[in-house]
Amino acid sequence: MKSVPRWGLLSAATAPVVLIGGWTVAAARQTGGFDSVTGTISALAAHGATDRWLMTSALVVLGCCHVTTAAALRPAGRTGRVLLALGGVATIGVAAFPLPEVGSSTVHKVFAGLAFGALAVWPLGAAVRGCGVPWALRPRTSAVASGGLLGLVGWFVIAQQQGAAVGLSERAAAGAQALWPLAVVLALTRTPTP
């Protein structure tokens, strides 16, 4: 098994910090308050949001972290690495095409859907068979991880349609998707290489 370079650990650890820190600080800065249970992450970066640059910057850094982590995850399957990088690029697209002050944006939705989809299924493509494979890259673990991430994305989709707890479900899905690459990198850095 190849090892993960230190910069890969740094990018994987930065991703959840910048995402959760970004939505926390951006929500606190909203004039008139912000309900994180019902308000989306995208609303914090939308045109008309107070200090929208905070969440926009956090999304760009998050996307860059995913691309960097994908490059560092040399022991993982190529398909998974490509999907993780694609999720990162799509996250940057979410930031580049923010929601308008009122209404929705088809381009924003396409990038958000691509990001959520790619980041939910990348563990399946990252799975590796063989002896000595760290737990986080084993096929069964990867399938469970993707199943859980897809379940959280499904909750978000249902919440959007029902109009309840949209922000909470989105934060659960996005937060888990930001944490899983870190779990994989940590599993690889703790596994001795022959």
Image: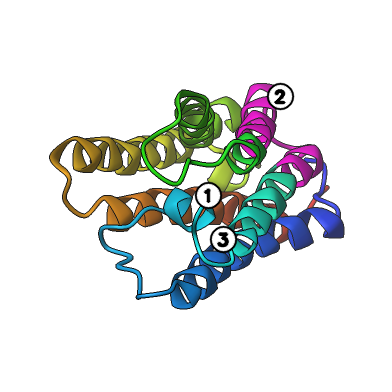
Look at the image and say whether residue 38 sits in the magenta stretch.
no
Q: Residue 19: give its label.
A: 3
Q: In front: mark 3 or mark 2?
A: 3
Circle 2 is placed at which residue position?
78
The residue at the point 53 percent across, 34 percent down is 115
Residue 9 at x, y percent in the picture: 75, 59
Residue 73 at x, y percent in the picture: 75, 41
The residue at the point 69 percent across, 63 percent down is 14
Give, as a single range, the part of the protein colored magenta: 67-90
Look at the image and say whether residue 77 sits in the magenta stretch.
yes
Residue 22 at x, y percent in the picture: 57, 66
Q: Earlier in the sequence, mark 1 or mark 3?
A: 3
Asked whether 14 or 2 is in front, the reply is 14
Do callouts 2 and 1 mark residues in contact (Cβ within 8 Å)?
no
The alpha-carbon separation of the residues under discs 3 and 2 comes to: 25 Å
The image quadrant of residue 171 is bottom left
In this rendering, the answer to whether 32 lies above or below 154 is below
Residue 127 at x, y percent in the picture: 57, 31
**Amino acid bearing label 3:** Leu
Do callouts 1 and 3 mark residues in contact (Cβ within 8 Å)?
no
Q: Residue 47: give its label.
A: 1
